[in-house]
Image (cartoon, grey):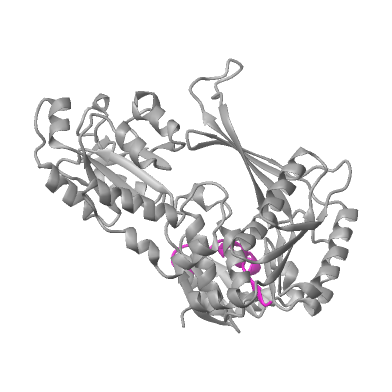
Amino acid sequence: MGAESRLIDALRRERPTVLVVGDVLLDRRWEGSAERLCREGPVPVLDVSRTLDAPGGAGNTAMNLAALGARVRLIGVAGDDEPGEALARCLAERGIDTDGLVRLPNRTTPVKARLVADGQLLLRSDFCRAADDDEARLVADRTLAALEEADAVVLCDYGLGALAALDHSAVREGARALVVDARRPSAWADIHADVVTPNASEAAELLGSSAPHGDRFEWAAEHAEEITRATGARHTLVTLDRDGTILLDHGRAGHVTHARPAPEQNAVGAGDTFVAGLTLGLAAGLAIDDAADVAQAAADVVVESPGTSVCTVAQLVGELRGEHAAWASAVSSWDEAREAVASARRAGRAIVLTNGVFDELHRGHTAFLEEAARLGGLLVVGINSDESVRRLRGSSPVIAEEDRAAVVAALGSVDCAVVFDSETAVPLIRELRPDVYVKGGDYLPGMLAEQSAVHEVGGRLELLGYVQRRGVPVGAHAEEPSEERLS
């Protein structure tokens, strides 16, 4: 029986109860467009079209556990202000028990705010304060009172002081399964957690050294004994972001997981999702190796989408079963393209769309498509028909549309290639409704007829960079004039 089958079986028997304790904050994201500069200074003006709120820190771990089917109780520190109300509302909508949330009068809620213009991060502002002593004492008291009912406990220490008054020995004695996710794992060595999850930099700090370079798996294996001794935990799971994780057990390197590549902006909160998947697996009775696989699968799901997001049970099971591979087949008909998009959406994956002529495919094209593939779960490429190329160029492409589509579809980065006959990608965008529409860096948003269509379907425009070709800086589509809106 595979890990996913054992997990499903365990969840069917009884939903585990997980106690999440730690530093809670609100992730607030202002999205819109920036097409003009401020008169007071040379900075863009963001015309905000929507505001998105999501619990961050321990709140994000709690949200992911709830989405994965656990009963969740959250204990942490917020404020009695508007962000605190928004935070509590988001948590309550997920069915998370927030009776343990400490919200004293005249206190503020930690907030991390991001300003995003057409998918590009302009600025991040942090409004974070440390918990006061009286708040930390209330967190400690409420934690001890809640231990008995929990199948697992996860402590999220991001340095904001919510856990400062916690009695380590009492928590260790009362917790059936204990996971520690801490910026400074050495501060928790005496609690002897079942699992601690330092990243590579935090593991290196335990040794008094700088972050490792080169093969980080090899580095962790070489220092396994020192790292595990410094964490004091039964299992130390070193997380290596884009690479995966390595389990260090009793001073030896063991089980390894491998992560799916993803753009940096999509990794926001993925560590919290990993910890949630790991804790759920342990609470459901899985062995540490299987729990690590569950955690990695959950993290792979959320990095498919930008911003703070969660992994659901259906998405997790699909990921563990490898169902995402079912849509990774090149297609050429519109019916097949629609079905590929629908299947990906049912699995909770982001849809990325780009388009172009792709005549005489070169390395600029392939580099562009590889970068585009890292932006989401399903990459659909629209191939301009021979007739549409003739209308725009006044001449036929060198290579016929069927062959151009077949070559693009054969690339490992491409999931689906479909031929379309319009002069712009607007009909393609309206039909497939992508989450992300991608063009090369030689295009500006204002030059694209497709920009308004992207906004119309609720997607975002992503402009990628340049690739050197024969010594000349070009966009991925530079063999065609940009005003033709072709690639």
At 85% from the left edge and 57% from the top edge, which residue is drawn?
Answer: 136
Asked which quadrant contains residue 109, the reply is: top right
Q: In this view, does 8 lie to the left or right of 439?
A: right
Vertical relation: 274 (above or below) 59? below
At 37% from the left edge and 27% from the top edge, which residue is drawn?
Answer: 444
- Camera-side residue of 462 and 388: 388
Residue 27 in view (yes/no): yes
x and y, in percent, of residue 139 in the image: 84, 60
Q: Is residue 216 left or right of residue 82?
A: left
Asked which quadrant contains residue 73, the reply is: bottom right
Could you tell me which quadrant the C terminus lies in? top left
Whether 56 is among the magenta residues is no
Residue stretch in magenta: 194-216
x and y, in percent, of residue 249 in the image: 58, 81
Vertical relation: 370 (above or below) 171? above
x and y, in percent, of residue 235 in the image: 62, 78
Q: In this view, does 12 lie to the left or right of 375?
A: right
- Camera-side residue of 360 and 176: 176
Vertical relation: 260 (above or below) 1? above
At 28% from the left edge and 45% from the top edge, which residue is drawn?
Answer: 381
x and y, in percent, of residue 68 in the image: 59, 64
Residue 439 in view (yes/no): no
Vertical relation: 280 (above or below) 331? below
- Camera-side residue of 313 and 377: 313
At 25% from the left edge and 48% from the top edge, which residue is drawn?
Answer: 417
Q: How many labels does the image show?
A: 0
